[in-house]
Image (cartoon, rainbow, N blue to C red):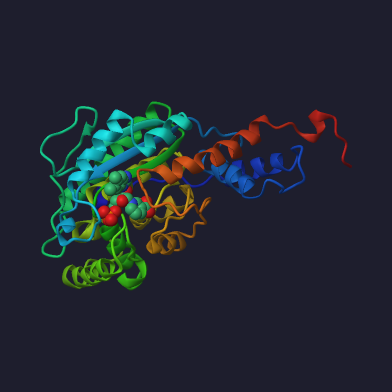
Amino acid sequence: MNHLLTEIPPLDKASGKKAEDHLNQLTKPPGSLGRMEDIAVKIAEITGNPFPAAEPPGILVFAADHGIAEEGISAFPSEVTALMAANFAAGGAAINVFARMIDARLKVADIGIKEEKQDPGVENCRIRNGTGNFLKEKAMTAEEAESAILTGKRLAAELIDAGVRCLIPGEMGIGNTTSAAALTAAITGKDPGEVTGKGTGITAEAQEKKANLIRKALTMHNPDRSNAVELLSAAGGLEIAGMCGAIIAAAEHRVPVLLDGFICTAAACLAVLINPDIKGYLIAGHQSEEPGHKTALEWLGLKPLLQLQLRLGEGSGAAIAYPIIKGSVRMLSEMATFEKAGINVT
Ligand SMILES: O=C(O)c1ccc[n+]([C@@H]2O[C@H](COP(=O)([O-])O)[C@@H](O)[C@H]2O)c1
Ligand SMILES: Cc1cc2nc[nH]c2cc1C
Protein backbone atom coordinates (compact mmCIF):
# COMPACT_ATOMS: atom_id res chain seq x y z
CA MET A 1 0.00 0.00 0.00
CA ASN A 2 3.03 2.28 0.34
CA HIS A 3 2.76 3.72 -3.16
CA LEU A 4 -0.78 4.88 -2.33
CA LEU A 5 0.55 7.09 0.47
CA THR A 6 0.86 10.52 -1.01
CA GLU A 7 1.75 14.03 0.01
CA ILE A 8 -1.38 15.89 0.98
CA PRO A 9 -0.64 19.62 1.20
CA PRO A 10 -1.48 21.10 4.61
CA LEU A 11 -4.50 23.40 4.77
CA ASP A 12 -3.41 27.02 4.28
CA LYS A 13 -4.66 28.63 7.50
CA ALA A 14 -3.23 32.04 6.50
CA SER A 15 -5.43 32.16 3.37
CA GLY A 16 -8.39 31.08 5.51
CA LYS A 17 -7.72 33.94 7.93
CA LYS A 18 -7.52 36.45 5.04
CA ALA A 19 -10.84 35.15 3.70
CA GLU A 20 -12.38 35.42 7.17
CA ASP A 21 -11.16 39.02 7.62
CA HIS A 22 -12.51 39.93 4.19
CA LEU A 23 -15.89 38.30 4.94
CA ASN A 24 -16.19 40.57 7.97
CA GLN A 25 -15.81 43.65 5.77
CA LEU A 26 -18.54 42.68 3.30
CA THR A 27 -21.91 44.43 3.22
CA LYS A 28 -23.76 42.11 5.63
CA PRO A 29 -23.92 41.74 9.39
CA PRO A 30 -20.85 39.69 10.43
CA GLY A 31 -21.61 35.96 10.34
CA SER A 32 -25.02 36.50 8.73
CA LEU A 33 -24.28 34.09 5.88
CA GLY A 34 -23.84 31.36 8.47
CA ARG A 35 -22.35 28.09 7.27
CA MET A 36 -21.72 29.58 3.83
CA GLU A 37 -19.06 31.72 5.48
CA ASP A 38 -17.44 28.62 7.01
CA ILE A 39 -17.42 26.99 3.57
CA ALA A 40 -15.79 30.05 2.00
CA VAL A 41 -13.02 29.98 4.65
CA LYS A 42 -12.59 26.21 4.25
CA ILE A 43 -12.19 26.49 0.47
CA ALA A 44 -9.69 29.33 0.94
CA GLU A 45 -7.69 26.99 3.22
CA ILE A 46 -7.98 24.06 0.79
CA THR A 47 -6.95 26.02 -2.30
CA GLY A 48 -4.42 28.31 -0.58
CA ASN A 49 -6.24 31.30 -2.08
CA PRO A 50 -8.29 33.84 -0.05
CA PHE A 51 -10.38 34.47 -3.19
CA PRO A 52 -10.75 30.91 -4.52
CA ALA A 53 -12.72 29.51 -7.44
CA ALA A 54 -14.90 26.37 -7.14
CA GLU A 55 -16.03 26.41 -10.79
CA PRO A 56 -16.44 24.41 -12.87
CA PRO A 57 -17.49 21.36 -10.85
CA GLY A 58 -16.59 17.90 -12.15
CA ILE A 59 -18.67 14.79 -11.54
CA LEU A 60 -16.93 11.44 -11.83
CA VAL A 61 -19.35 8.49 -11.76
CA PHE A 62 -17.81 5.05 -11.24
CA ALA A 63 -19.97 2.04 -12.15
CA ALA A 64 -19.29 -1.51 -10.96
CA ASP A 65 -21.05 -4.71 -9.96
CA HIS A 66 -21.07 -6.70 -6.75
CA GLY A 67 -20.95 -10.48 -6.37
CA ILE A 68 -22.89 -10.13 -3.11
CA ALA A 69 -25.95 -9.09 -5.18
CA GLU A 70 -26.64 -12.80 -5.81
CA GLU A 71 -27.60 -13.09 -2.11
CA GLY A 72 -30.83 -11.12 -2.71
CA ILE A 73 -29.77 -7.99 -0.81
CA SER A 74 -30.96 -5.46 -3.43
CA ALA A 75 -34.41 -4.67 -4.82
CA PHE A 76 -32.86 -4.74 -8.33
CA PRO A 77 -30.73 -7.23 -10.32
CA SER A 78 -27.08 -6.61 -11.24
CA GLU A 79 -28.04 -6.07 -14.90
CA VAL A 80 -29.32 -2.61 -13.94
CA THR A 81 -25.76 -1.38 -13.32
CA ALA A 82 -24.79 -1.68 -17.00
CA LEU A 83 -28.17 -0.36 -18.14
CA MET A 84 -27.88 2.72 -15.93
CA ALA A 85 -24.29 3.33 -17.06
CA ALA A 86 -25.64 3.43 -20.62
CA ASN A 87 -28.38 5.80 -19.44
CA PHE A 88 -25.70 8.12 -17.97
CA ALA A 89 -23.89 8.05 -21.31
CA ALA A 90 -27.14 8.87 -23.12
CA GLY A 91 -27.87 11.81 -20.79
CA GLY A 92 -31.16 10.52 -19.36
CA ALA A 93 -30.41 9.91 -15.68
CA ALA A 94 -31.00 12.21 -12.71
CA ILE A 95 -27.29 13.00 -12.51
CA ASN A 96 -27.33 14.18 -16.14
CA VAL A 97 -30.14 16.61 -15.34
CA PHE A 98 -28.34 17.97 -12.27
CA ALA A 99 -24.97 18.10 -14.07
CA ARG A 100 -26.51 20.26 -16.79
CA MET A 101 -28.20 22.41 -14.15
CA ILE A 102 -24.85 23.23 -12.45
CA ASP A 103 -22.71 23.33 -15.66
CA ALA A 104 -20.61 20.38 -14.48
CA ARG A 105 -18.20 18.28 -16.48
CA LEU A 106 -19.44 14.69 -16.22
CA LYS A 107 -17.38 11.57 -16.78
CA VAL A 108 -18.71 8.02 -16.44
CA ALA A 109 -16.25 5.17 -15.91
CA ASP A 110 -16.85 1.43 -16.04
CA ILE A 111 -14.44 0.23 -13.36
CA GLY A 112 -15.98 -3.22 -12.91
CA ILE A 113 -19.34 -3.86 -14.57
CA LYS A 114 -20.30 -7.54 -14.91
CA GLU A 115 -21.99 -7.38 -18.31
CA GLU A 116 -19.51 -8.32 -21.08
CA LYS A 117 -20.82 -5.81 -23.60
CA GLN A 118 -19.57 -2.30 -23.01
CA ASP A 119 -21.25 1.00 -23.88
CA PRO A 120 -19.05 3.18 -26.12
CA GLY A 121 -20.12 6.30 -24.18
CA VAL A 122 -18.69 4.92 -20.94
CA GLU A 123 -14.94 5.11 -20.35
CA ASN A 124 -13.59 1.58 -20.13
CA CYS A 125 -11.41 1.23 -17.02
CA ARG A 126 -12.70 -2.22 -16.09
CA ILE A 127 -10.54 -4.08 -13.61
CA ARG A 128 -12.70 -7.20 -13.43
CA ASN A 129 -16.29 -8.12 -14.26
CA GLY A 130 -17.79 -7.40 -10.84
CA THR A 131 -16.45 -8.36 -7.43
CA GLY A 132 -16.59 -11.81 -5.85
CA ASN A 133 -19.45 -12.65 -3.48
CA PHE A 134 -17.81 -11.63 -0.19
CA LEU A 135 -19.95 -14.06 1.78
CA LYS A 136 -18.00 -16.85 0.06
CA GLU A 137 -14.69 -15.32 -1.03
CA LYS A 138 -12.82 -12.05 -0.97
CA ALA A 139 -14.48 -9.29 -2.99
CA MET A 140 -11.20 -8.67 -4.84
CA THR A 141 -7.45 -9.13 -4.49
CA ALA A 142 -5.28 -6.45 -2.88
CA GLU A 143 -3.74 -5.81 -6.32
CA GLU A 144 -7.17 -5.20 -7.84
CA ALA A 145 -8.10 -2.84 -5.01
CA GLU A 146 -4.88 -0.88 -5.54
CA SER A 147 -5.41 -0.76 -9.33
CA ALA A 148 -8.94 0.57 -8.83
CA ILE A 149 -7.68 3.27 -6.44
CA LEU A 150 -4.98 4.27 -8.91
CA THR A 151 -7.55 4.36 -11.74
CA GLY A 152 -9.73 6.71 -9.70
CA LYS A 153 -6.72 8.90 -8.99
CA ARG A 154 -5.86 9.09 -12.67
CA LEU A 155 -9.41 9.95 -13.79
CA ALA A 156 -9.79 12.69 -11.17
CA ALA A 157 -6.36 14.13 -12.00
CA GLU A 158 -7.42 14.29 -15.68
CA LEU A 159 -10.58 16.24 -14.79
CA ILE A 160 -8.60 18.60 -12.56
CA ASP A 161 -5.98 19.11 -15.29
CA ALA A 162 -8.87 20.03 -17.61
CA GLY A 163 -9.89 22.79 -15.16
CA VAL A 164 -12.29 21.23 -12.65
CA ARG A 165 -12.18 23.09 -9.30
CA CYS A 166 -14.66 21.06 -7.19
CA LEU A 167 -14.84 17.28 -7.40
CA ILE A 168 -18.05 15.30 -6.96
CA PRO A 169 -17.46 11.53 -6.79
CA GLY A 170 -20.51 9.49 -7.81
CA GLU A 171 -21.33 5.80 -8.19
CA MET A 172 -23.68 3.22 -9.64
CA GLY A 173 -23.55 -0.37 -8.47
CA ILE A 174 -26.35 -2.74 -7.59
CA GLY A 175 -25.52 -4.22 -4.16
CA ASN A 176 -23.13 -1.46 -3.12
CA THR A 177 -25.02 -0.39 0.01
CA THR A 178 -24.15 -3.85 1.41
CA SER A 179 -20.50 -3.21 0.71
CA ALA A 180 -20.66 0.35 2.11
CA ALA A 181 -22.37 -0.94 5.27
CA ALA A 182 -19.69 -3.65 5.74
CA LEU A 183 -16.91 -1.05 5.34
CA THR A 184 -18.64 1.46 7.65
CA ALA A 185 -19.24 -1.18 10.35
CA ALA A 186 -15.60 -2.29 10.15
CA ILE A 187 -14.17 1.25 10.21
CA THR A 188 -16.39 2.74 12.91
CA GLY A 189 -16.72 -0.41 15.06
CA LYS A 190 -20.53 -0.25 14.93
CA ASP A 191 -22.62 -3.39 14.70
CA PRO A 192 -23.72 -4.08 11.08
CA GLY A 193 -27.36 -3.90 12.24
CA GLU A 194 -26.89 -0.20 13.01
CA VAL A 195 -25.44 0.78 9.64
CA THR A 196 -27.45 -1.44 7.27
CA GLY A 197 -30.38 0.14 5.46
CA LYS A 198 -32.90 -0.62 2.75
CA GLY A 199 -30.72 0.52 -0.18
CA THR A 200 -32.84 0.58 -3.34
CA GLY A 201 -35.90 -0.47 -1.29
CA ILE A 202 -35.72 -3.99 0.20
CA THR A 203 -38.11 -5.39 2.79
CA ALA A 204 -37.40 -5.34 6.55
CA GLU A 205 -36.81 -9.10 6.33
CA ALA A 206 -34.19 -8.73 3.58
CA GLN A 207 -32.60 -5.89 5.55
CA GLU A 208 -32.09 -8.22 8.52
CA LYS A 209 -30.58 -10.87 6.26
CA LYS A 210 -28.29 -8.18 4.79
CA ALA A 211 -27.00 -7.18 8.25
CA ASN A 212 -26.48 -10.82 9.23
CA LEU A 213 -24.46 -11.63 6.15
CA ILE A 214 -22.27 -8.56 6.72
CA ARG A 215 -21.63 -9.73 10.32
CA LYS A 216 -20.73 -13.19 9.06
CA ALA A 217 -18.44 -11.90 6.29
CA LEU A 218 -16.53 -9.53 8.59
CA THR A 219 -15.91 -12.38 11.04
CA MET A 220 -14.81 -14.67 8.22
CA HIS A 221 -12.40 -12.23 6.49
CA ASN A 222 -11.35 -10.41 9.68
CA PRO A 223 -9.64 -7.53 7.84
CA ASP A 224 -7.30 -5.07 9.54
CA ARG A 225 -9.86 -2.33 10.14
CA SER A 226 -7.33 0.45 9.68
CA ASN A 227 -6.07 -0.83 6.32
CA ALA A 228 -8.08 0.52 3.34
CA VAL A 229 -6.76 -2.04 0.85
CA GLU A 230 -7.50 -4.98 3.15
CA LEU A 231 -11.00 -3.64 3.77
CA LEU A 232 -11.66 -3.19 0.05
CA SER A 233 -10.29 -6.64 -0.66
CA ALA A 234 -12.53 -8.23 2.00
CA ALA A 235 -15.86 -6.54 1.30
CA GLY A 236 -15.33 -3.52 -0.94
CA GLY A 237 -16.41 -2.51 -4.39
CA LEU A 238 -14.43 -1.43 -7.43
CA GLU A 239 -16.44 1.80 -7.70
CA ILE A 240 -15.78 2.46 -4.00
CA ALA A 241 -12.05 2.01 -4.57
CA GLY A 242 -12.27 4.30 -7.62
CA MET A 243 -13.99 7.04 -5.61
CA CYS A 244 -11.39 6.60 -2.85
CA GLY A 245 -8.62 7.23 -5.40
CA ALA A 246 -10.45 10.22 -6.90
CA ILE A 247 -10.80 11.78 -3.43
CA ILE A 248 -7.08 11.28 -2.76
CA ALA A 249 -6.19 12.94 -6.10
CA ALA A 250 -8.43 15.96 -5.39
CA ALA A 251 -6.75 16.52 -2.02
CA GLU A 252 -3.31 16.17 -3.62
CA HIS A 253 -4.29 18.91 -6.09
CA ARG A 254 -5.85 21.17 -3.42
CA VAL A 255 -9.33 20.74 -4.91
CA PRO A 256 -12.35 20.53 -2.55
CA VAL A 257 -14.38 17.29 -2.61
CA LEU A 258 -18.17 17.51 -2.32
CA LEU A 259 -19.36 14.16 -1.00
CA ASP A 260 -22.59 12.52 -2.12
CA GLY A 261 -24.38 9.69 -0.28
CA PHE A 262 -23.54 6.66 1.83
CA ILE A 263 -21.35 4.79 -0.65
CA CYS A 264 -19.37 7.89 -1.58
CA THR A 265 -18.84 8.70 2.11
CA ALA A 266 -17.65 5.14 2.82
CA ALA A 267 -15.04 5.73 0.08
CA ALA A 268 -14.03 8.98 1.82
CA CYS A 269 -13.55 7.05 5.10
CA LEU A 270 -11.14 4.72 3.26
CA ALA A 271 -9.24 7.71 1.82
CA VAL A 272 -8.93 9.14 5.34
CA LEU A 273 -7.56 5.78 6.57
CA ILE A 274 -4.90 6.09 3.86
CA ASN A 275 -4.08 9.66 4.87
CA PRO A 276 -5.93 11.42 7.73
CA ASP A 277 -5.03 14.86 6.30
CA ILE A 278 -7.58 14.23 3.52
CA LYS A 279 -10.35 14.98 6.04
CA GLY A 280 -9.74 18.72 5.68
CA TYR A 281 -10.60 18.58 1.96
CA LEU A 282 -14.07 17.06 2.39
CA ILE A 283 -17.46 18.79 2.41
CA ALA A 284 -20.63 16.70 2.94
CA GLY A 285 -23.26 17.54 0.33
CA HIS A 286 -26.14 15.77 2.05
CA GLN A 287 -27.15 13.01 4.44
CA SER A 288 -28.97 10.18 2.75
CA GLU A 289 -31.66 7.87 4.09
CA GLU A 290 -29.16 5.06 4.73
CA PRO A 291 -28.57 4.85 8.51
CA GLY A 292 -24.87 4.16 7.99
CA HIS A 293 -24.43 7.48 6.23
CA LYS A 294 -24.96 9.39 9.48
CA THR A 295 -22.45 7.08 11.19
CA ALA A 296 -19.84 7.60 8.46
CA LEU A 297 -20.33 11.39 8.45
CA GLU A 298 -19.94 11.48 12.24
CA TRP A 299 -16.76 9.40 12.01
CA LEU A 300 -15.41 11.97 9.52
CA GLY A 301 -16.59 14.87 11.71
CA LEU A 302 -18.72 16.31 8.86
CA LYS A 303 -22.10 18.03 9.00
CA PRO A 304 -24.19 17.61 5.83
CA LEU A 305 -25.39 20.68 3.92
CA LEU A 306 -28.74 19.12 3.00
CA GLN A 307 -31.11 16.46 4.30
CA LEU A 308 -33.63 15.78 1.55
CA GLN A 309 -34.32 12.06 2.24
CA LEU A 310 -32.38 11.21 -0.92
CA ARG A 311 -31.16 7.66 -1.56
CA LEU A 312 -30.20 7.67 -5.20
CA GLY A 313 -26.42 7.96 -5.41
CA GLU A 314 -24.83 8.79 -8.81
CA GLY A 315 -23.44 12.00 -7.22
CA SER A 316 -26.97 13.44 -7.30
CA GLY A 317 -27.18 14.84 -3.74
CA ALA A 318 -23.79 16.52 -4.04
CA ALA A 319 -24.75 18.05 -7.40
CA ILE A 320 -27.88 19.49 -5.79
CA ALA A 321 -25.79 20.91 -2.92
CA TYR A 322 -23.18 22.39 -5.26
CA PRO A 323 -24.86 25.83 -5.72
CA ILE A 324 -24.28 26.39 -1.98
CA ILE A 325 -20.54 25.93 -2.60
CA LYS A 326 -20.63 28.13 -5.69
CA GLY A 327 -22.46 30.92 -3.83
CA SER A 328 -20.13 30.69 -0.81
CA VAL A 329 -17.06 31.19 -2.95
CA ARG A 330 -18.60 33.81 -5.22
CA MET A 331 -19.74 36.02 -2.35
CA LEU A 332 -16.09 36.28 -1.24
CA SER A 333 -14.94 37.73 -4.55
CA GLU A 334 -18.08 39.50 -5.79
CA MET A 335 -19.70 41.22 -2.80
CA ALA A 336 -18.91 44.86 -2.04
CA THR A 337 -17.19 45.84 1.20
CA PHE A 338 -18.82 48.48 3.42
CA GLU A 339 -16.02 50.83 2.39
CA LYS A 340 -16.56 50.30 -1.35
CA ALA A 341 -20.34 50.71 -1.02
CA GLY A 342 -19.84 53.94 0.93
CA ILE A 343 -21.62 52.57 4.00
CA ASN A 344 -20.06 53.95 7.12
CA VAL A 345 -20.81 51.64 10.03
CA THR A 346 -18.40 52.95 12.70
O1 LIG B 1 -26.19 7.38 -2.03
C1 LIG B 1 -26.86 6.73 -1.22
O2 LIG B 1 -26.88 7.00 -0.01
C2 LIG B 1 -27.66 5.55 -1.76
C3 LIG B 1 -28.57 4.93 -0.94
C4 LIG B 1 -29.30 3.87 -1.46
C5 LIG B 1 -29.07 3.42 -2.77
N1 LIG B 1 -28.15 4.04 -3.54
C6 LIG B 1 -27.91 3.58 -4.95
O3 LIG B 1 -28.57 2.35 -5.16
C7 LIG B 1 -27.67 1.32 -5.51
C8 LIG B 1 -27.34 0.47 -4.33
O4 LIG B 1 -28.49 -0.01 -3.66
P1 LIG B 1 -28.59 -1.57 -3.34
O5 LIG B 1 -29.95 -1.73 -2.73
O6 LIG B 1 -28.49 -2.25 -4.68
O7 LIG B 1 -27.47 -1.88 -2.44
C9 LIG B 1 -26.42 2.02 -6.00
O8 LIG B 1 -26.46 2.13 -7.40
C10 LIG B 1 -26.46 3.38 -5.31
O9 LIG B 1 -26.03 4.39 -6.19
C11 LIG B 1 -27.46 5.10 -3.06
C1 LIG C 1 -32.86 2.56 -11.52
C2 LIG C 1 -31.69 2.80 -10.60
C3 LIG C 1 -30.93 3.97 -10.72
C4 LIG C 1 -29.85 4.19 -9.86
N1 LIG C 1 -28.95 5.17 -9.75
C5 LIG C 1 -28.10 4.87 -8.78
N2 LIG C 1 -28.46 3.72 -8.25
C6 LIG C 1 -29.52 3.24 -8.89
C7 LIG C 1 -30.26 2.07 -8.75
C8 LIG C 1 -31.35 1.86 -9.60
C9 LIG C 1 -32.15 0.60 -9.44
Q: Which of these two is toward me, 71 or 66?
A: 71
Q: With respect to residue 256, does 265 lie above or below?
A: below
Q: With respect to residue 57, does 33 lie above or below?
A: below
Expressed as whole percent of the image width and height from the top left, the position of residue 302 reads: 49, 57
> Can residue 37 be seen in the rendering of this structure?
yes
Tell me the quarter of the image containing the C terminus. top right
Q: What is the number of callouts on the image?
A: 0
At 34% from the left and 34% from the top, the residue drawn is 157
Expressed as whole percent of the image width and height from the top left, the position of residue 107 reads: 32, 32
Q: Is residue 270 left or right of residue 139?
A: right
At 50% from the left and 43% from the top, the residue drawn is 321
Q: Which of these two is toward me, 89 or 139?
A: 89
Expressed as whole percent of the image width and height from the top left, the position of residue 1 reads: 24, 53
Q: With respect to residue 82, does 204 lie above or below?
A: below
At 54% from the left and 32% from the top, the residue drawn is 53
Q: Is residue 36 left or right of residue 113?
A: right
Quarter-of-image position of residue 86 = top left
Q: Is residue 139 left or right of residue 207?
A: left
Quarter-of-image position of residue 269 = bottom left
Q: Residue furthest front?
A: 203
> Can residue 5 be seen in the rendering of this structure?
no
Expressed as whole percent of the image width and height from the top left, the position of residue 168 reads: 41, 41
At 42% from the left and 50% from the top, the residue drawn is 278
Quarter-of-image position of residue 221 = bottom left
